[in-house]
Amino acid sequence: MPYHPKSEFMNVMMTRGFLADCTDYQGLDEALSKAVVPAYIGFDATAKSLHVGSLIQIMMMRWLQKTGHKPITLMGGGTTKVGDPSFRADERPLLGPDQIDDNIAGIKQVFAAYLSYDDTPTGALMLNNAEWLDDLKYLDFLRDIGRHFSINRMLSFESVKSRLDREQSLSFLEFNYMILQAYDFLELNRRYGCLLQMGGSDQWGNIVNGIDLTRRVLDHEIYGLTSPLLTTSDGKKMGKSQSGAVWLNADMCSPYEFWQFWRNTTDADTGRFLKLYTELPVEECDRLGALEGSEINAAKIILANEVTTLLHGAHAAQAAEATAREVFEKGGVGDDLPTLTLSADEVGDGISIVQLIVKSGLAKSGKEAKRLIAENGARINDAPLTEAGMMIDADALSAPIKLSAGKKRHALVQLG
C-alpha cells in the first residue's frame, strides 16, 4: 500500500524522485511533522570540488531547509584519512592533512549557493568530523564503540561483500570506515540533536550502522533516508561527460561547460532531471519532459538555465545560453567558450593540432584526438579538420581559433 506522507519534506522526496529507501517512513514523517529536524549528509574531501554526482544530495539538503528543517553539511576531515571502501574495487589513495584541508576549502564554496548558513532554527551548519575523530583514544574507542559492532554483520553488507566476492583486498583501515561513519551519526545526535542521515543508496549499510549504534549507546530513535544511485538512461554514471567529471566549482568547470552538460541531456532523462535538479513544479517538469522532437530542446535549455542559475547565478546562465546560441545558430564564436591561452614560448615554431585538441580538453589523449580527426568529428573554425599532422604557428593564432569535437563541444585557442 503506498504511503501518503504528512510532512512537506517527505512529500517532495517522494514526488520528485529523491527517495530510494528509508529506515522508518512513518516514524520519520511524524518527526518531520512535529518539529524542526536536523539532518546531515557527509562529504569526504577526496578532491578540491564535488562533481555533478553529488548534486542530488545537495538538492536534498536544499529542499530540507526550504521545507522548514535544519541541514548539516559534514566535511569528512577525519574520515577522508581512511577512505570509504563502499562499492570500490581498490583502496583510495591516502591524502595528507594539508591536501584534505585544501580540498575542504574548495568544497565549501559550493554549499553557500544552495543553503543559508545563519543562526536561525533552520540555519545550516557546516561541521568537520575531524573535530571528534582526530582526538579519539584507540583503546577507549574500541571498548566503548567497537564492542557494539558484529564482524559477521559487517561482512554481510553489500559494499563489503562485493569486494570480498571478487577476492579483492579490503584493508583493516578501510574496514574501520563504517565504524567511524556510524560514530559520526552518534556524535551529531549527541551534540546537535541530529535525527536523520541522508546519502546515496550505496551508503545504506553505513547509515544503518549509525542508527544501531546510537540506539545502543544513547537509546535515541534516529532515521536514515537514501536517494537512488543515478545513471543516465544510456547507463552512464551521473556526473561524467566525454571530457571527464563535471565539477561544481567554476574554476574547474566553467559555467558555460556546466550549462552545456545539462543542455546535452538525453531526451529520456529530461523530465526526471528537471524534477531532481530544479525547483520547477512537478507538473511543469512532467509537461516539459513529455515534449518530443525539436520541442524537447526547449525543455533542455530550461533545464540548463535553471540548474546553472542555482549554482552560478542567473547572469552566468544567461551568458551561457547566449554563447550557445551564438556558436550553434550563427556559427560564430561566443564570449563564454572554454578558452585555452598559450604563451609565445609554448607555440614556438609551431604546435600540432593534435596537441591543441588535447590541451583544450576536447580529447583525453593524442590517440583519441587523431581518431576524432580520422572519423571526421573535428572542425577548425567550423571547417572540417582532416589533417592530423597540421601545425599551428603564432601567425595562425593572431586571431583566436575555434576547435570543435562533434556538434556540441567547442573551445577557443588564443595567444596570450
Image: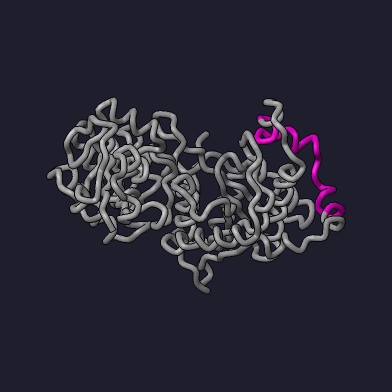
Pinpoint residue 139: horizontal percent, then vertical percent. Answer: 87, 56
The residue sitting at 66% across, 40% down in the picture is 91
The residue sitting at 39% across, 31% down in the picture is 367
Pinpoint residue 24: horizontal percent, then vertical percent. Answer: 62, 44
Residue at the far bottom in the pictured view: 119
Q: Which image quarter holds the C terminus?
A: bottom left
Q: Is residue 395 left or right of residue 193?
A: left
Q: How is the image coloured?
A: one colour
Q: How many marks?
A: 0
The residue sitting at 62% across, 61% down in the picture is 98
Name the quadrant containing residue 185: bottom right
Name the quadrant containing residue 285: top left
Is residue 221 at least partly visible in the picture?
yes
118 over 225 or under it: above or below: below
Magenta span: helix, strand or loop, mainly?
A: helix
Q: Is residue 154 magenta?
A: yes
152 over 313 or under it: above or below: above
The residue sitting at 52% across, 74% down in the picture is 119
Which of the pair 384/32 is nearer the observer?
Answer: 384
Residue at the far left in the pictured view: 330
The range drawn in magenta is 142-162
Which of the pair 268/404 is nearer the observer?
Answer: 404
105 over 405 or under it: above or below: below
Pinpoint residue 14: horizontal percent, then vertical percent. Answer: 46, 43
Q: Is residue 144 magenta?
A: yes
Q: Is residue 192 left or right of residue 57?
A: right
Pinpoint residue 332: horizontal percent, then vertical percent. Answer: 15, 47
Q: Is residue 93 left or right of residue 200?
A: right
